[in-house]
Image (cartoon, rainbow, N blue to C red):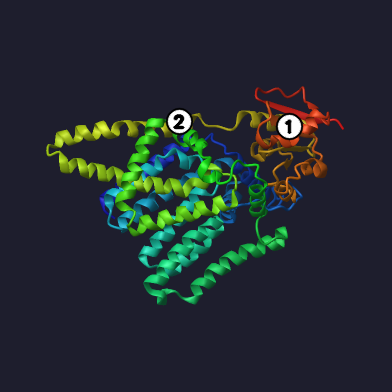
């Protein structure tokens, strides 16, 4: 390994470790659902969310299995998840660099990996399988280019075990192999993929009495319900990404899009570019067709595409400047004028991670419930992650992601079932009530629930059932 690669990989590791430390207080609501599964398992309560109730709300089996393995050693969840996700994000950066080194593009290797490892978005997915998913996607592409098809078959199964949408990349890569030389495809490659997937499905069946995770049908039901905005929300309702990933920096986004379009126009015909782009297109079609709620981590492959084409765009602009300006000092001045603002803004964005932490109102509610209610108390809300993690109480998700049957009822707009089936002692909503929290509104208005005077937190209200 030459010095340039060593420097590249060292910088990736250093930046990844530092920014992960910046991100140590970040808590993603959906990730805390995973945390509770892991904690219940290592405490001997089984792989469940609510103790005593076998319901599979695990979207990423492989990620949970890895997390359980590590947490069983550390006997801890939160710090373990931080370190594990830090390792994954560093591994993605190294894999991205390695892919471009393999393609004999050292400038792209260095630039794309540096942009990736310092991009705020990927740290805002910590606690979920996102970076593991990107890692396995990149490794699969690397093994495709290296023609290591046995390893590719193993990774194909593991990729789909991380997220089902990995199927799209698997289809792309194996279709390319078939097109290039179908004799390279052996039957045992298919068997390996099938055994990996079937093993997990059999576990699901014997442990949860269902071959597939309940979250799959839950999200499909939510999509059918129409409660999550207009059709095609995955491509039409992404304004929240502007705030979350770019902190509403309009000029920065303008720079990003211009560089993306330059890189896209000049490099889309390259094989790697086509693989990544088609992957993101199929990903988009899948989510649009199901109209599932457009959580920010679902856009990870799109952000990976963004980084690759931006990197190409930056290098293309640099080459253009070099071809038009002869004097080295002038080239430096012009480059600084063009790139100093987006570079400084990019640095500022990941520094903002130090301000991120748990959702204060949800955490306060969970801690209040833990301290002031019996252990068998049932609590209902529409975002159960924080409240469930901090309260250690039985959670009723009005949207059905962690409770049997509820999601199917949501899909058919039978939105009273959360109350009729579970009759939770407490509910938590925003003040004023927002979004799908309207499912609880009539029970507040008819006096079934009254405000809990012991819990006071701006922007939130806790209600207690009195009848």
Residue lying at 42% horizontally and 58% vertically, measured from the top left: 139
Q: Is residue 295 left or right of residue 325?
A: right
Q: Residues within 10 Å of mark 1 (few under 14, many from 20)?
A: many
Q: Position of residue 61 (x, y in %)?
A: 59, 55
* Marker disc for residue 350: none
Residue lying at 61% horizontally and 42% vertically, measured from the top left: 30
Q: Earlier in the sequence, mark 1 or mark 2?
A: 2
* Marker disc for residue 369: 1
Determine whether the residue tagged by mark 1 lies in a helix, strand or loop.
helix
The residue under label 2 is 248
Picture layout, residue 261 above or below residue 370:
below
Q: Position of residue 90 (x, y in %)?
A: 42, 47
Q: Can residue 314 be spotted in the picture?
A: yes
Total tally of numbered discs in the picture: 2
Q: Is residue 449 left or right of residue 311?
A: right
Q: Residues within 10 Å of mark 2 (few under 14, many from 20)?
A: some
Residue sitting at the far right:
467
Quarter of the image with the N terminus is bottom left
């Amino acid at each position: 390994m030459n010095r340039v690669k060593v420097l590249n990989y060292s910088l990736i590791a250093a930046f990844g470790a530092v920014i992960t430390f910046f991100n140590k207080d970040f808590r993603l609501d959906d990730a805390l659902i995973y945390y509770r599964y892991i904690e219940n398992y290592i405490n001997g309560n089984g792989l469940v969310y609510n103790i005593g109730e076998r319901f599979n709300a695990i979207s990423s089996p492989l990620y949970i299995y890895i997390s359980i393995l590590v947490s069983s050693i550390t006997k801890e969840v939160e710090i373990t998840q931080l370190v594990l996700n830090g390792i994954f994000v560093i591994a993605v950066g190294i894999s991205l660099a390695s892919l471009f080194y393999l393609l004999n593009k050292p400038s792209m290797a260095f630039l794309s990996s540096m942009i990736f490892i310092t991009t705020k978005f990927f740290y805002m997915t910590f606690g979920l399988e996102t970076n593991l998913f990107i890692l396995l996607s990149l490794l699969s592409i690397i093994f495709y280019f290296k023609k290591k098809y046995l390893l590719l078959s193993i990774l194909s199964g593991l990729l789909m075990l991380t997220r089902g949408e990995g199927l799209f990349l698997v289809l792309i890569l194996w279709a390319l192999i078939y097109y290039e030389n179908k004799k390279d495809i052996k039957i045992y490659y298919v068997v390996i993929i099938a055994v990996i997937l079937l093993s997990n499905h059999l576990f699901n069946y014997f442990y949860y009495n269902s071959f597939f995770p309940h979250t799959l049908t839950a999200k499909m039901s939510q999509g059918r319900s129409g409660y999550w905005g207009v059709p095609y929300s995955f491509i039409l309702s992404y304004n929240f990404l502007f705030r979350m990933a770019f902190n509403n920096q309009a000029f920065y986004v303008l720079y990003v899009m211009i560089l993306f379009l330059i890189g896209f126009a000049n490099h889309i015909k390259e094989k790697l570019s086509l693989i990544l782009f088609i992957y993101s297109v199929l990903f988009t079609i899948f989510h649009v067709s199901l109209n599932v709620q457009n959580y920010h981590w679902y856009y990870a492959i799109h952000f990976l595409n963004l980084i690759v084409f931006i990197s190409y765009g930056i290098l293309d602009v640099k080459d253009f400047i070099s071809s038009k300006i002869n004097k080295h000092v002038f080239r430096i001045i012009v480059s600084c004028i063009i790139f100093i603002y987006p570079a400084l803004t990019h640095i500022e964005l990941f520094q903002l991670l130090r301000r991120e932490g748990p959702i204060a109102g949800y955490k306060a509610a969970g801690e209040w419930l833990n301290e002031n209610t019996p252990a068998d108390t049932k609590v209902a809300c529409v975002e159960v992650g924080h409240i469930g993690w901090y309260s250690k109480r039985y959670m009723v998700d009005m949207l059905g992601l962690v409770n049997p049957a509820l999601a199917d009822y949501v899909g058919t707009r039978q939105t009273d079932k959360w109350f009729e089936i579970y009759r939770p002692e407490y509910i938590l909503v925003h003040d004023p009530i927002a979004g799908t929290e309207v499912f609880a509104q009539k029970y507040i208005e008819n006096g079934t629930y009254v405000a809990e005077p012991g819990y006071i937190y701006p922007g939130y209200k806790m209600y207690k059932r009195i009848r």
